[in-house]
Image (cartoon, rainbow, N blue to C red):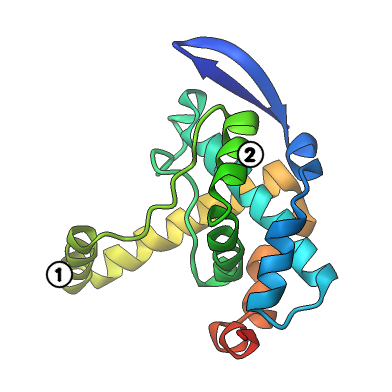
Amino acid sequence: MWLKLYFMNTTIALCKIDDVLEYKNEDVIFRFLRQYKFDEDEAEMLFQETKKFLFLSAYLMHPDNRDVPNSDSGAFIDNSIHVIDKMWHNFILFTPDYQYFCNHYFGRYLHHMPLRQKAYHHEQAYYKSSPDLYSKEKLEMQKQQMKLVGELFGKETLIKWYYTFPREYTRKYVKRKRR
């Protein structure tokens, strides 16, 4: 899968997921292993999945993909893949490396945007007023993201993110692995 990169409405580069996955950063892995009691292979795998997630976010924010529902803010982290968020936080701390990675592969810095207070209160009010509709919309967002994960990265990644990770990397388990 290729991702076109633009500057002032002109294609300036093409990015392939394979190129993104070739990026290595021993410091990111080293720090993650100091923070969590995972083995090195597991940390490497989580870093690979994090790079896929970042590719997905860049893909969704690309001007050519504005027809994809909820694409304006990129991909989202739900409970299924929260362990990817842990590695992303770790990567961001190496700010120059993370900035280089984003600019080199995606042509822009990918911000990590947590749920803001105003949006949280809006979501809570919406949920209280229409819980069925709220749940239906959230489920649809997840289905759309899952579909795209399957299309971009294949069935193996789809199963890993939405079947294996929620069972093996529960919040409780990841918290216990914290040093």
Q: Quadrant of the C terminus?
A: bottom right
Q: Which mark is residue 101?
A: 2
User: Is any atom of residue 100 visible in this view?
Assistant: yes
User: What is the total number of numbered labels drawn onto the structure image?
Assistant: 2
User: Is any atom of residue 164 visible in this view?
Assistant: no
Query: Is 122 above or below relative to 102?
Result: below
**Residue 81 vs residue 128: left or right?**
right
- Identify the element where label 1 is drawn: helix
Query: Is 47 above or below relative to 69?
Result: below
Residue 30: x and y in percent read 73, 66
- Of the image marks 2 and 1, the number of the one nearer the N terminus: 2
Q: Quadrant of residue 23?
A: top right
**Residue 102 vs residue 29: left or right?**
left
Can you identify the residue that label 1 sits on? 129
Camera-nearest label, 2 or 1:
2
Q: Nearer the viewer, residue 75 or 146?
A: 75
